[in-house]
């Protein structure tokens, strides 16, 4: 077998059959599938066992609920160490019939790459395409940090650390084929709660992999990414905490080269600068409403705060120097990474939370 496929499944009875059928329909047949029933309370266990009985390449693994990262890690641990590639497909997403063929070709065509990924498209709960072109455009509009500046990154170039340091342009693990040797080197998914609650454990893993090589790009759709009411929540505060955790963890990695560390510092500066600009617009929007309601005092305060955010945005755009005040603010706004962290050691910015509306 050439590929180990891991499908974590929690209460996935509605979508799991369609997902597995998309695997069975692959033009590449040399694979194994490990379905991890993550403590489901519906018919997921029965469905997984039925698929395992139907095809010898499929195995069902059952465990108490450990969350998405834990289920993925368990599936990997149960996989054959003889396969060359590994991929993690969510239980509600669908592959194109040639997904594995396309990704294997991309990875074999770039022996220096640690992984290969393709494009994805949105589908609804019925499997029908929605918002055509929007998700595909996310990859096609990648940017990278080059010589301290943000530049456009063409599709013919691989996805590098300089790209992923800006944002997680790869929407789902189901579009990424990983070399087993690379995964063994960097380790599995981080189960820290700030990542799993915000669905950012993927980004953390991609960054760790990119420290050792690039991601080859297959410029075609390989994944149908389902949007429905049961998708993991991505509330603003949870996303903020998750992003902060990933950025601190990555910046403090002893494996970073000096250039990678510089890239991460610039990325963090850009991220918080953008946040300051958004907060400025937020305050000005509320001020406009206060003026409409003839609340001059409140409007004046909002306008002043908005300009403070905007001036910070302008300053951050043109300087990578980070004061201890900003680092302290970041540490107070989120639980820090599990490591020794001193303000003087970290050139990492943290943002304000918008004031509550009275």
Image (tube, rainbow, N blue to C red):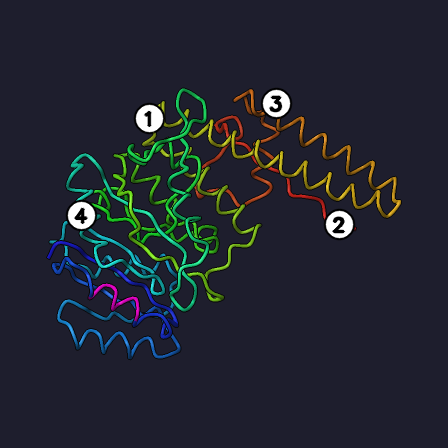
Q: Is residue 20 magenta?
A: yes
Q: Secondary structure at mark 4?
A: helix
Where residue 194 sits: x, y (%)?
Answer: 48, 51
CA distance separating discs 3 and 2: 27 Å
> Between disc 3 and disc 4, whose residue precedes?
4
Q: Which residue is mark 1?
A: 257
Q: CA distance from mark 1 to mark 4?
A: 29 Å
Q: Which residues are magenta?
A: 18-24
Distance between the alpha carbons at the discs numbered 1 and 2: 44 Å
Query: Which residue corresponds to mark 3?
Result: 315
Q: Position of residue 168 (x, y in %)?
A: 41, 43
**Disc marking residue 104:** 4
**Do tag 4 and tag 2 residues touch (Cβ < 8 Å)?**
no
Q: Is residue 36 left or right of residue 339?
A: left
Residue position marked by numbered label 2 in the rendering: 357
Residue 149 occupies which quadrant of the picture?
A: top left
Per the image, label 1 sits on a secondary structure element best described as loop
Asked whether disc 1 touches disc 2, contact meaning CB atoms under 8 Å apart, the reply is: no
User: Dots 3 and 4: beta carbons under 8 Å?
Assistant: no
Which is nearer the N-term, disc 4 or disc 2? 4
Residue 325, compared with residue 8, is above or below; it is: above
- 47 relative to 179 in the view: left or right: right
Residue at 35% over, 57% down: 224
- Please, what secondary structure does the residue beneath circle 2 have? loop
Mark sitting earlier along the chain (1/3): 1
Q: Quadrant of the N terminus?
A: bottom left
Q: Residue 146 appears at what percent x and percent y?
A: 39, 23
Pick whichever of labels 3 and 2 is earlier in the sequence: 3
């Amino acid at each position: 077998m050439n590929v180990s496929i891991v499908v974590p499944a929690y209460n996935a009875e509605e979508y799991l059959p369609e997902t597995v059928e998309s695997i069975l329909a692959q033009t590449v047949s040399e694979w194994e599938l490990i379905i991890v029933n993550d403590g489901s309370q519906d018919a997921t266990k029965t469905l997984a066992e039925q698929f395992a009985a139907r095809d010898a390449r499929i195995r069902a693994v059952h465990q108490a609920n450990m969350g998405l990262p834990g289920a993925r890690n368990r599936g990997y641990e149960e996989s054959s160490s003889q396969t060359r590639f590994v991929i993690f497909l969510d239980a509600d997403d669908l592959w194109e019939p040639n997904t594995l063929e396309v990704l294997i070709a991309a990875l074999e065509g770039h022996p220096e790459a640690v992984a290969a990924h393709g494009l994805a498209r949105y589908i609804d709960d019925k499997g029908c395409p929605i918002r055509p072109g929007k998700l595909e455009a996310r990859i096609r509009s990648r940017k990278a940090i080059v010589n301290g500046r943000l530049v456009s990154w063409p599709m013919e170039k691989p996805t590098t650390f300089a790209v992923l340091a800006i944002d997680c342009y790869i929407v789902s693990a189901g579009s990424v084929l990983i070399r087993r040797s690379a995964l063994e080197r960097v380790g599995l998914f981080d189960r820290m709660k700030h990542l799993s609650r915000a669905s950012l454990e993927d980004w953390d893993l991609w960054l760790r992999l990119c420290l050792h090589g690039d991601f080859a790009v297959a410029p075609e759709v390989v994944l149908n990414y389902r949007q429905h009411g049961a998708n993991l929540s991505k509330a603003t505060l949870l996303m903020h905490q998750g992003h902060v955790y990933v950025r601190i963890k990555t910046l403090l990695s002893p494996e970073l080269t000096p250039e990678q560390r510089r890239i991460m510092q610039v990325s963090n500066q850009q991220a918080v600068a953008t946040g300051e600009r958004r907060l400025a617009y937020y305050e000005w929007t509320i001020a406009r409403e206060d003026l409409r309601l003839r609340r001059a005092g409140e409007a004046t305060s909002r306008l002043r705060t908005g300009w403070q955010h905007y001036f910070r945005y302008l300053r951050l755009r043109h300087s990578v120097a980070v004061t201890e005040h900003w680092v302290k603010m970041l540490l107070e706004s989120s639980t820090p990474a599990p490591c020794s962290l001193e303000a003087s050691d970290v050139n990492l910015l943290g943002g304000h939370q918008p004031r509550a509306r009275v």
